[in-house]
Amino acid sequence: MKFAALVPIKDHSERVPGKNFREIAGRPLWQHIVAMLSSMDEIPAIYIDTDSQRFTSEVLAPYPKVRIIERPERLRGDFVPTNHLFAHDLTLIPETFTHFLQTHTTNPLLTAATIRAAMKALDGGRAAHDSLFTVTPYFARFFRRDGSAINHDPRELKRTQDLDPVLEENSNLYLFTRESFARTASRIGERPLMFEMDRLEATDIDDPATWQLAEALLLNRPSSQ
């Protein structure tokens, strides 16, 4: 099964200025995810949806799988739902691609091994599931703002490892098909499979603190990864 990868990359970033093109652990942030995706035989094409003019032929020379989709003006800005981007992208990607993988530059620790495991899980569960997204389990006591408990009884202090975990959609990886997207207009289909990931690998750069965390993890990651 072959997947076309979708990677949205905008020029502007509000909380970490210029983060997609800022150097982290020896290379621009965007190159970490693109280099990893480029190494996978399961991914013959990588589509970068962008409003940036920085992706020159010289910059992209090491990544022959990359295709650029120039983001139209109507889909630019910080408040455009990303599903609107993907709906536009799918109209421009050849119909021969029926399966899609979507990830972000802000997930530089995501590994090919995890992607392959997710692909295998979805393939094995395709009778029950039409899409997949990754989650991070948290074994902790969570409350709503009104003080009510979400996943525990405050009067019964169970060990945190014995609680029902709360699952965070970690924005690392989404797998879907043209058919599932057409039904929901979303990368998450009607019958998604939630795929659990390691918490450190799932680190998503969203602010200066998570940038520092991701950089420390990248600099100390085994060379085999």
Image (cartoon, rainbow, N blue to C red):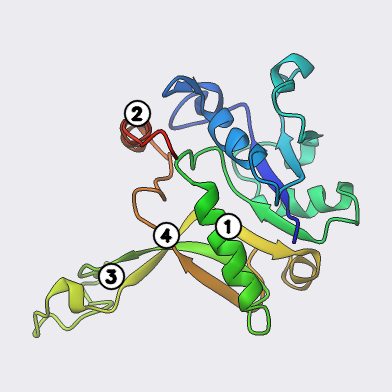
Above or below for 57 versus 51: above
Q: Earlier in the sequence, mark 2 or mark 3?
A: 3
Q: CA distance from mark 4 to mark 1?
A: 12 Å
Give the SS element for disc 4: loop
Q: Residue at x 82, y 53 (%)?
A: 90
Residue 174, quarter of the rendered image: bottom right
Disc assigned to residue 167: none
Q: Earlier in the sequence, mark 2 or mark 1?
A: 1
Q: CA distance from mark 2 to mark 3?
A: 36 Å
Q: Earlier in the sequence, mark 2 or mark 4?
A: 4
Q: CA distance from mark 2 to mark 4?
A: 20 Å
In this view, the residue in front, 208 or 124, is: 124
Q: Is residue 87 left or right of residue 205?
A: right
Q: Residue at x 56, y 63 (%)?
A: 118
Given contact means CB atoms under 8 Å apart, are the residues at marks 2 and 3 in contact? no
Disc assigned to residue 197: 4
Residue 91 image offset from top left, x and y in percent: 87, 52
What number of labels is visible?
4
In this view, the residue in front, 103 or 9, is: 103
Q: Residue at x 62, y 71 (%)?
A: 122
Q: Amino acid at mark 3?
A: Arg
Disc assigned to residue 219: 2
Q: CA distance from mark 3 to mark 1?
A: 36 Å
Q: Is residue 136 left or right of residue 64?
A: left
Q: Which residue is label 1 attached to?
A: 116
Disc assigned to residue 144: 3
